[in-house]
């Protein structure tokens, strides 16, 4: 089974004159069956891409909401093998591209080539490993490319030009711009310098630029959609799953999608030369 194209998804959203909505869920929280139901909920609510987090005991960039979700998932026995085994069901139910987010240790323990081969074979489209620097990720990028997976790197508003260029060059699918320094969470909103940060990232890549960290409401999603090509929401959806399960997740996803659509046709891909 091959994953659905991230590139084609962004192209479709561009044709519709809006940013893509990328919804994050913590796999295995509270259990594997619920993960499948929650994936269906974000799809029904209007998400365009599903980012699925593989739980790890010491996540690098995640705040308390996602850390707690990972703790619950690990306590319930979630494993890399079981999560990969869920992917065909999720793809069948949602028809969304799936980006796997994980720390490097689980990938290394599983085996880089084996992980990429199995992930792609089960239906994943992309891979995001926040604690693996692009300078150190050549072998994983090669394994991912060989399996047909996009590799996605994170950059921050204050990432220096040289490192931004390296991350952009190593990325495929999209470039992930964190809106502010710190960890994931629902408080604080996107950073004040968001527009300038997106503009600077676009100077280094023709890929779509998607923004995450601190986006939790329809208004915040609209603000990001006015300047970026993708809006990434994680902690708010994970929190909604704890409070109200699938129905709450679907409703919040729908609110976020409405916020994105209200941004109008400003949400279009502009490449490093400034043309659409």
Image (cartoon, rainbow, N blue to C red):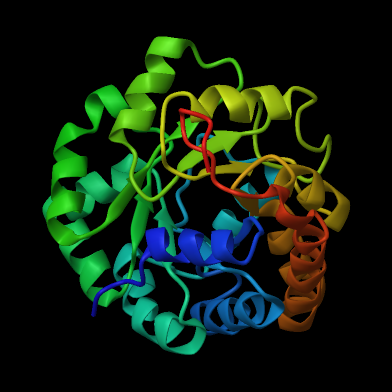
Location of residue 22 by image quarter? bottom right
Question: Which residue occupies 62% across, 66% down?
Answer: 16
Q: Is residue 132 left or right of residue 52?
A: left
Residue 26 appears in the rendering: no
**Residue 141, position as x, y percentages in the image:** 21, 42
Rendered view: 171 above or below 231? above
Question: Which residue occupies 81% across, 38% down?
Answer: 189
**Residue 142, position as x, y percentages in the image:** 14, 43
**Residue 216, position as x, y percentages in the image:** 79, 52
Question: Which residue occupies 53% across, 31% down?
Answer: 274
**Residue 188, position as x, y percentages in the image:** 83, 34
The residue most toward the right is: 219
Q: Is residue 18 left or right of residue 28?
A: right
Nearer to the camera, 43 or 67: 43
Nearer to the camera, 147 or 65: 147
Q: Is residue 22 left or right of residue 161?
A: right
Question: Which residue occupies 33% across, 67% down?
Answer: 124
């Amino acid at each position: 089974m091959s994953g659905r194209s991230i590139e084609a998804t962004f192209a479709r959203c561009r044709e519709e004159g809006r940013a893509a909505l990328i919804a994050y869920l913590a796999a295995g929280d509270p259990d594997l069956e619920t993960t499948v139901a929650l994936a269906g909920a974000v799809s029904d609510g209007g998400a365009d891409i599903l980012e699925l987090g593989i739980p790890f005991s010491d996540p690098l960039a995640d705040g308390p909401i996602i850390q707690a979700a990972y703790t619950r998932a690990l306590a319930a026995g979630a494993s890399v093998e079981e999560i990969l085994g869920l992917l065909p069901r999720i793809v069948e139910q949602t028809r969304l591209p799936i980006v796997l987010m994980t720390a490097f240790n689980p990938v290394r323990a599983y085996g880089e080539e084996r992980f990429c081969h199995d992930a792609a074979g089960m239906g994943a489209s992309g891979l995001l490993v926040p604690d693996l620097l692009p300078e150190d990720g050549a072998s994983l990028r090669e394994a991912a490319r060989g399996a047909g997976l996009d590799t996605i790197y994170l950059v921050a508003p204050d990432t220096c030009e040289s490192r931004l260029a390296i991350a952009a060059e190593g990325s495929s699918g999209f470039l992930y711009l964190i809106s502010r320094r710190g960890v994931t969470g629902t408080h604080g909103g996107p950073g004040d310098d968001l527009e300038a940060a997106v503009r600077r990232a676009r100077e280094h890549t023709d890929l779509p630029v998607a923004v995450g960290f601190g986006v939790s409401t329809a208004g915040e999603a609209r603000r990001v959609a006015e300047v970026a090509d993708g809006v990434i929401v994680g902690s708010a959806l994970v929190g909604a799953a704890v409070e109200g399960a699938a129905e709450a997740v679907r409703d919040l996803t729908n609110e976020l999608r409405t916020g994105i659509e209200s941004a109008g046709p400003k949400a279009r891909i502009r490449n490093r030369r400034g043309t659409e």
